[in-house]
Amino acid sequence: MDAVRVALLREVLAGTEWLGATRRFAGSLRGSVVSHGGGLLLVGTPDYEPWHLAAHLVDEAAWSGTPELAPTLVRHDARPSDPAHLAVGLGRLEAARRGETLLVVSPGEPGAALLERVSDARRAGAVLLSLGPADGELPALAHETLPVPEGSELDLDTVQHLVSAAAGENAVPRRGRRTLRDRLSHLADLLTAPPPPRW
């Protein structure tokens, strides 16, 4: 069954650059957090918080034995009463420094306030990665960008699944760790599963 799901996903991606592009981007992500040894900060926009990417990166960090991949989700409307993993606000970006990696996920050009904070984090030495818009200030600021233009074969949510699967990929598979084939099989499950029933 796994081979069927992987084949289906590969068919969807056949003739596109997505697998190669997401693997390169994920390699940059993995390389920046491992080589710098700092934290991974993940932030979206006020209207688009990358919850699923955060959860999948936590899983991939555990499965790949790369704890540095587990991100800190930085939220626009975090409150002190939120659970600890959801209570990190934008002030965390102001504290970003050399050795840390900031991954910004946005379906379009972020607002000026976020761009200013991101720019300040980069000036302070943080590695800046961008997943989303192909043009604008954010990709111009980023050290590495994976553009997901409107109308492309895959949407931003699906590309995040590919990035998280590729980020956990190890050059030398170890016993008990999932291979990229396993990760693609899981992604195919997510993409082909029927929608949950609505009550």
Image (cartoon, rainbow, N blue to C red):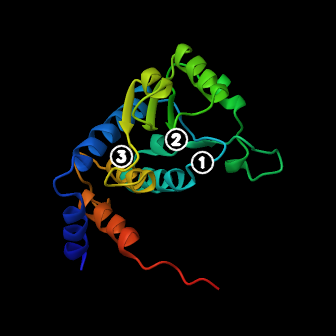
The answer to whether residue 191 is left or right of residue 196 is left
Q: Which residue is mark 3?
A: 167
- Above-or-below relation of 164 to 177: above
Report, in whole angstroms, how far the alpha carbon at label 1 lies from the one at label 2.
7 Å
- Residue 112: image quadrant is top right
92 or 162: which is nearer to us?
A: 162
Instruction: Tell me the mark number nearer the camera, choosing from 3 and 1.
Output: 1
Between discs 3 and 2, the one toward the N terminus: 2
Residue 113 position in % (x across, y down) = 67, 26
Q: Which residue is mark 2?
A: 106
- Residue 153: image quadrant is bottom left
Query: Marks 3 and 2: CB-CB under 8 Å?
Result: no
Query: Marks 1 and 2: CB-CB under 8 Å?
Result: yes
Residue 47 position in % (x across, y down) = 64, 47
Which element carries disc 1, helix, strand or loop?
Answer: loop
- Above-or-below relation of 46 to 124: below
Residue type at the position of mark 2: Ser
Which element carries disc 3, helix, strand or loop?
Answer: helix
